[in-house]
Amino acid sequence: MAKNPSAEGIYVMCRGLTSDREQKYPAAELRFRPAAYGLYIRHGEILLGRSRFTGKWDIPGGGVEPWETLEEGMTREFREETGVSVRVERLVDFRESFIAFAQHPFHSLRYYYLVSANDGQTLAPDLDELTSVGWVRLDEIQPEECARGDLALIERVMKTEGSRD
């Protein structure tokens, strides 16, 4: 990776994905990571995956490739992780943070979309990333079972959108 002379001597605190512990990284090592996620709500439940890395419930989605739009990247990641092809309805949230994953620091830009899909699709988790995928009711989710902020986002979207039947 090329060094950025303007970042010399600057450090950024990055929080780990699997813990709340922060670690200091040289700013020149940071990588931008735009990512997009889909909230698929149906019959009062949300489709979530159980992360192989953290053991927590995850909103399906992930990193967007440089040649993809945010919506293209989200629909691809959603399909890869769950087996479900979705349609984007609208953007519902954006979050920015500094994270560390696999000893690499990232400036994380996360876009969250409300999505819909045709019924009858078979759930097929990506077993390299998830241990399972399934429909979960809000009252079945404990705060510690989700990434920081995800449960509040799910609650807000389910309250404002209701059950998308």
Image (cartoon, helix red, strand yellow):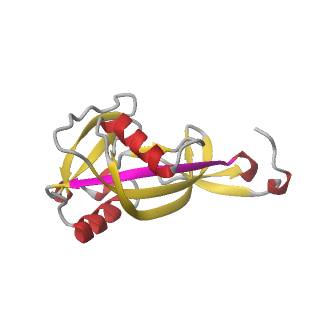
Return the x and y of residue 42 as percentages of the image width and height. Answer: 18, 54
Furthest-right residue in view?
5
For the view shown, which residue lies furthest in the top direction? 128
Q: How many labels does the image show?
A: 0
Residue in front for this viewpoint, 50 or 83: 83
Seen in the picture, residue 140 relative to 79 is either above or below; the reply is below
Q: Does the magenta stretch include residue 13?
A: no
Residue 39 colored magenta? yes
Left or right of 28? Residue 53 is left
Q: Position of residue 8 (x, y in %)?
A: 83, 53
Q: Which residue is drawn at 24% across and 67% down?
A: 161
Question: Seen in the image, is 160 located left or right of residue 112?
Answer: left
Residue sitting at 14 percent across and 55 percent down?
43
Place residue 1 in its image quadrant.
top right
Q: Along the horizontal axis of the image, is 137 left or right of 67?
A: left
Determine the image quadrant of residue 164. bottom left
Of helix, strand and loop, which mostly describes the magenta segment? strand
Q: What stretch is highlighted in magenta?
A: 30-41
Q: Is residue 14 visible?
A: yes
Residue at (47% x, 44% y) in the render: 73
Q: Where is residue 159 in the image (x, y as percent from the top left)?
A: 23, 69
Q: Residue at x 60, y 39 (%)?
A: 103
Decide if residue 18 is in sight here: no
Image: 143 above or below 62? below
Quarter holding the C terminus is bottom left
The residue at the far bottom in this view is: 160
Name the spot of residue 151 as percent of width and height, x first.
31, 60
